[in-house]
Amino acid sequence: MPIFCEIVVAHALPAIRSALAMELVKGRGATQMYACELMGITQPAISQYLKGKRGRSMAKISSNKKVTGAIKALAGKLIRSKNPQKDLNDGICGICKIMRKQKMLDDTRFPYQYCVK
């Protein structure tokens, strides 16, 4: 049986990264190079997120106001950050918790309280 974080990595993380890349580049005017530095991924990955070639596994992410609000807040924080890696880690963890609370990652193998405290 996979651990819960494996489900997150396979399904939620690509969608979060895609939405974050979109917000940084299209919403905040960052270049793809600057966005890839902030997110710790390659420029081709940013390009694929922007073209919809990656991160399609959870299209419903954009319809959840709490999640999109957290992604926008994270993008703003990354733009201003002196330590983007720490802020990115904390922000993605927070978004994952929101998604868990909203039952967007509901999986019967893992009770709700499993990682959300």
Image (cartoon, grey):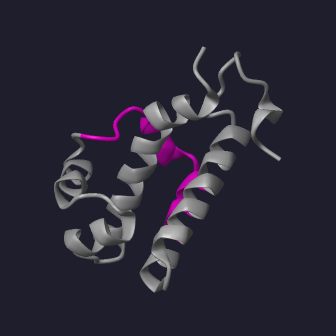
Q: Can residue 79 be seen in this view?
A: yes
Quadrant of residue 111 in the image? top right
> Percent position (x, y) of residue 7?
54, 29
* Residue drawn at (42%, 80%) of the image: 79
Q: Which of 95 and 42 is in front in this view?
A: 42
Q: Nearer the viewer, residue 1 or 48?
A: 1
* Residue drawn at (72%, 23%) of the image: 110
> Percent position (x, y) of residue 71?
51, 61
Query: Is 61 within the magenta?
Result: yes
Residue range of the region highlighted in magenta in the rendering:
54-73
Q: How many marks?
A: 0
* Residue drawn at (24%, 43%) of the image: 52
Q: Quadrant of the N terminus?
A: top right
Placement of 46 over or under 15, stated as above or below: below
* Residue drawn at (44%, 31%) of the image: 10
Q: Is residue 105 visible?
A: no
> Percent position (x, y) of residue 112?
78, 31
Query: Is 6 within the magenta?
Result: no
